[in-house]
């Protein structure tokens, strides 16, 4: 049965990560030729983004969110209001309330006072409760290593539970036009509007799984509509004008992935399939706070030009845990590069690497790791490509050496050992215009689980 | 180049019959391998085993390889553990996020299908 238009909800992806194409959300809300989207979904948070925001907040309590979101909203708000498009975004980072306040100020400045409600979702931030949680026996063991968080407690810079679609639904139900969250899952930002629009109960596992799959498909923006698409990549039309994906969802859990007419890119079954398997673990158990989706039940069909129909999706009950993402100070790293030219570019680069390593050793510097890559030879495919490259006299090779240590001193000293190679190492070397490499702080990611009962999502509505 | 054993069956590279996308979860890279034609999916299932993929990536990954089947998408999903030098911000690799393990897998050679 083809659903009637009133049974369709259209959710457009505007940002796949913090730093994605600034034109994408504008095009999503202004495009559509009389068929506008109902929701604009924007994902801003990667795993260690929260620690960067936490640092900004500690310096200035009015910061700690995706700052780019404010000028973006200044541009979008008049159109959003005119077309009655709602927004779901996790741009709030570690300070959703301050983000909402900044948006409210911007909205008032645009003459939208009295016309806008902002939903603010909090409750994900565990940093202030960390010691109490640990003391109460929530050890937050690292999912990869099994180690308890107590090991790195004094170095933890942020800790957030991943909230699901629930608080997004609540904010929409209470009339929010813009929902600003902290660490809500990428998928929850798409599932939330669907649950709200279709009144899906929180235990309709198949429907929730369908909304979760929809969210996974569009959470990386154009990666499902022609961007970073391997199949027939040189025949993807007009990438310069790429259309970001739109979910057209139906109450029965079927949905289409499509994009605005007149945009570039491509929505096809193979292209969408590439995105479905992206960052996939066990496909039968895609675990979110909302449900456990089974990706082996997804049925795909090309339902028209740039339109893929999803159906058949099954889900299982959610688990009683939430994922926690903590970030902790780990150490320092630096990467130095030099470019060697023909003839024998690769051999020269290898000699330079041996010379450099000898000098680091003679200096008595201790590193946790030294990694050498030869860009143009083995940096992407390692020894698999080397077999073919060893005999090829390539025009140039970039020597790329990275070091990592717990202390700053050896990393700092390493950064001074690159430039000397230009005059006292192998010949035909160039490409050092960037100057001495800079030591970088490493803030590492600590994934863990926590009992759901320990986390209470909170929704506030701010009237502008 | 392949080692010269007896000339047995002709081989093809996976890139001729499959496409792929890869990404990261911590220190684990995932590679989704998708048959270009549905009829080649059984060939992937039969030949691109976890053990075979582990051999292919020998020296590039420190941990085991897991394989999952998605017959509905004519796809296999591989988890390559210990592939990313610690992963995320810790990694010193150019490909710290495992983005091009996809095409690295497509270099793999398998026995050519006998058809038509």
Image: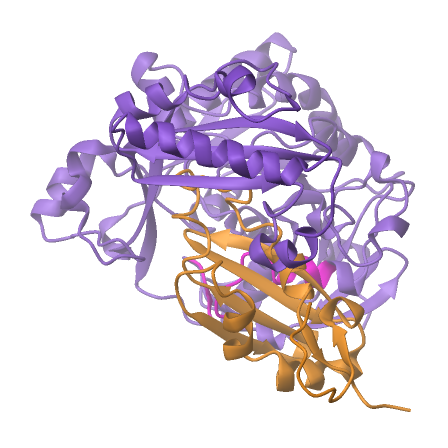
Chain colours: A purple, B orange
Image side of residue A138 versus residue A59, left or right: left
From the top left corner, tell me how far across and down residue B39 is, in percent: 79, 84
Read off the magenta span. A272-288
Q: Is residue A351 above or below residue A217?
A: above
From the top left corner, tell me how far across and down residue A438 is, in percent: 44, 19
Q: Of A334 and A180, which appears nearest the observer? A: A334
Residue drawn at x 85%, y 66% as measured from the top left = A303
Q: Quadrant of residue A79?
A: top right
Residue drawn at x 82%, y 90% as measured from the top left = B114
Q: Quadrant of the N terminus of chain A?
A: bottom right
From the top left corner, tell me how far across and down residue B30 is, in percent: 53, 61
Q: Is residue A63 above or below residue B52?
A: above
Residue drawn at x 40%, y 61% as measured from the top left = B62
Determine if the magenta segment contains residue A344: no
From the top left corner, tell me how far across and down residue A109 is, in percent: 60, 8
Image side of residue A398 versus residue A373, left or right: right
Question: Is residue A243 in view from this perspective?
Answer: yes
Residue drawn at x 75%, y 66% as measured from the top left = B15
Determine if the magenta segment contains residue A273: yes
Question: Is residue A315 in view from this perspective?
Answer: no
């Amino acid at each position: 049965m083809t659903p009637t238009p009133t049974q369709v909800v259209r959710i457009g992806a505007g940002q796949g990560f913090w730093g994605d194409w600034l034109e994408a959300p504008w095009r999503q809300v202004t495009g559509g030729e009389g068929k506008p989207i109902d929701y604009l979904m924007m994902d801003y948070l990667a795993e260690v983004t929260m620690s960067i925001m936490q640092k900004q907040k500690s310096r200035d309590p009015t910061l700690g969110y995706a700052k780019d979101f404010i000028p973006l909203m200044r541009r979008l708000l008049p159109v959003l209001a005119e077309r009655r498009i709602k927004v779901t975004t996790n741009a709030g980072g570690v300070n959703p309330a301050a983000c909402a306040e900044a948006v409210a100020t911007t909205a008032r400045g645009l003459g939208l006072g009295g016309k806008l409600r902002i939903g603010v979702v909090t409750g994900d931030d565990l940093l202030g409760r960390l010691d109490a949680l640990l003391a109460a026996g929530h050890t937050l063991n690292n999912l990869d290593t099994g180690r308890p968080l107590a090991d790195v407690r004094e170095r933890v810079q942020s800790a957030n539970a991943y909230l699901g679609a629930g608080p997004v639904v609540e904010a929409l139900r209470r009339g929010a036009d813009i929902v600003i969250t902290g660490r809500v899952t990428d998928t929850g930002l798409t599932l939330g509007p669907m649950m709200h629009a279709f009144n899906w109960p929180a235990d309709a596992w198949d429907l929730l799984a369908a909304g979760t799959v929809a969210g996974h498909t569009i959470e990386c923006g154009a990666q499902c509509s022609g961007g970073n698409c391997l199949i027939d990549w040189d025949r993807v039309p007009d990438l310069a004008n790429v259309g970001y994906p739109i979910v057209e969802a139906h109450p029965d859990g079927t949905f289409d992935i499509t994009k605005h007419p007149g945009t570039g890119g491509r929505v096809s079954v193979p292209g969408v399939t590439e995105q479905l398997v992206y960052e996939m673990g066990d496909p039968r158990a895609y675990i979110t706070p909302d449900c456990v989706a089974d990706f082996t039940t997804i049925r795909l069909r090309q339902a028209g030009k740039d339109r893929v129909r999803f159906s058949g999706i099954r889900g299982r009950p959610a688990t009683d845990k939430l994922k926690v993402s903590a970030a902790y100070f780990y150490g320092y790293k630096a990467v130095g590069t030099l470019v060697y030219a023909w003839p024998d570019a690769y051999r020269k680069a290898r000699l330079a690497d041996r010379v450099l390593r000898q000098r680091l050793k003679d200096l008595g510097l201790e590193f946790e790791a030294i990694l050498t890559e030869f860009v143009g030879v083995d940096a992407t495919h390692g020894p698999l490509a080397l077999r073919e490259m060893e005999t090829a006299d390539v025009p140039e090779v970039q020597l790329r050496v990275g070091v990592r240590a717990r202390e700053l001193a050896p990393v700092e000293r390493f950064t001074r050992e690159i430039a000397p190679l230009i005059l006292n190492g192998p010949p035909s070397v160039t490409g050092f215009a960037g100057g001495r490499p800079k030591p970088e702080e490493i803030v590492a990611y600590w994934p863990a689980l926590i009992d759901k009962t320990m986390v209470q999502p909170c929704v506030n509505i701010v009237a502008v | 180049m392949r080692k010269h054993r007896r000339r047995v069956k002709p081989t093809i590279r996976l890139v001729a019959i499959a496409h792929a996308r890869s990404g990261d979860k911590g220190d684990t890279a995932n590679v989704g391998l998708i048959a270009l034609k549905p009829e080649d999916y059984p060939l992937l299932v039969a030949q691109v085993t976890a053990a075979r993929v582990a051999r292919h990536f020998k020296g590039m990954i420190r941990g085991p390889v897991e394989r999952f089947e998605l017959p509905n998408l004519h796809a296999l999903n591989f988890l390559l553990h210990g592939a990313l030098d610690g992963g995320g911000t810790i990694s010193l690799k150019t490909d710290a996020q495992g983005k091009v393990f996809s095409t690295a897998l497509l270099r793999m050679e398998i026995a050519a299908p006998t058809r038509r």
